[in-house]
Amino acid sequence: MDVKEAVLAGLKELIVPELQVMKQAQAELKTTLGLTNKRLDDINSHLIDQSRRIDETNKRIDSIHADLITRIDKVNADLVTRIDKVNADLIARIDKVNTDLVTRIDKVNMDLIMRNDETNRGLARLYEVIVRREEHQFLAERVARLEQSLEELKRRQAA
């Protein structure tokens, strides 16, 4: 048994310290693994919390987006209504001004036509007067010539 005990004692001397080192390394690995798992759990919890916050933020963004679209659509509708009213008002004003201007232009046109007709009548009378004056002068010259001819005939008859 001595050999057996010697082999066992030799093996124990070689293997037992190695086993102790391995047990210690395993214990350290378990501790490190436990700490790593704890850290991973903490990170996982943190990521879950961040994901929840992101989801809440996205919901708020979607809500604000929907609210802004609604408000923009309302403002757009209000502006379109106001623009249509202003457009209708301006068209009515332009039509009124246009009608007033056409009326005034027609009045001025009629006044000018009447003045032109009056001027034409005056010119026609002036022409008649000028023609009569020329005829009068022509007749006066003719009467003078006839009187001369008559005087001449009277002289011839008397002589």
Image: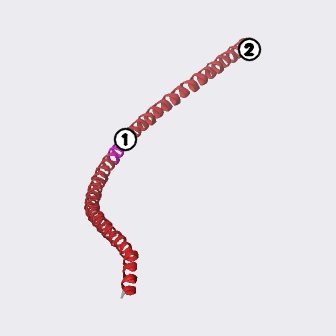
Left or right of residue 70, residue 108 in this image: right
The residue at the point 63 percent across, 19 percent down is 143
* 82 vs 104, nearest the viewer: 82
Question: In the figure, residue 147 lies in which quadrant?
Answer: top right
Q: Position of residue 47 (x, y in %)?
A: 30, 63
Amino acid type at image mark 1: Thr
* Disc on res. 103: 1
Residue 23 position (above or below residue 123)? below
133 part of magenta stretch? no
CA distance for labels 1 and 2: 78 Å
Question: In the figure, residue 96 lies in which quadrant?
Answer: top left
Amino acid type at image mark 2: Arg
* Disc on res. 156: 2
Q: Main secondary structure of the magenta part?
A: helix
Q: Residues within 10 Å of mark 1 (few under 14, many from 20)?
A: few
Q: Secondary structure at mark 1?
A: helix
Disc 1 or disc 2, which is closer to the eye?
1
Q: Position of residue 8 (x, y in %)?
A: 37, 82
Residue 44 position (above or below residue 139)? below
* 105 vs 78, nearest the viewer: 78
* 96 vs 46, nearest the viewer: 46
Earlier residue among tags 1 and 2: 1
Q: Position of residue 53 (x, y in %)?
A: 26, 60
Chain part drawn in magenta? 90-99
Q: Secondary structure at mark 2?
A: helix
The residue at the point 71 percent across, 12 percent down is 155
Residue 93 position (above or below residue 1)? above
Q: Residue furthest front?
A: 2
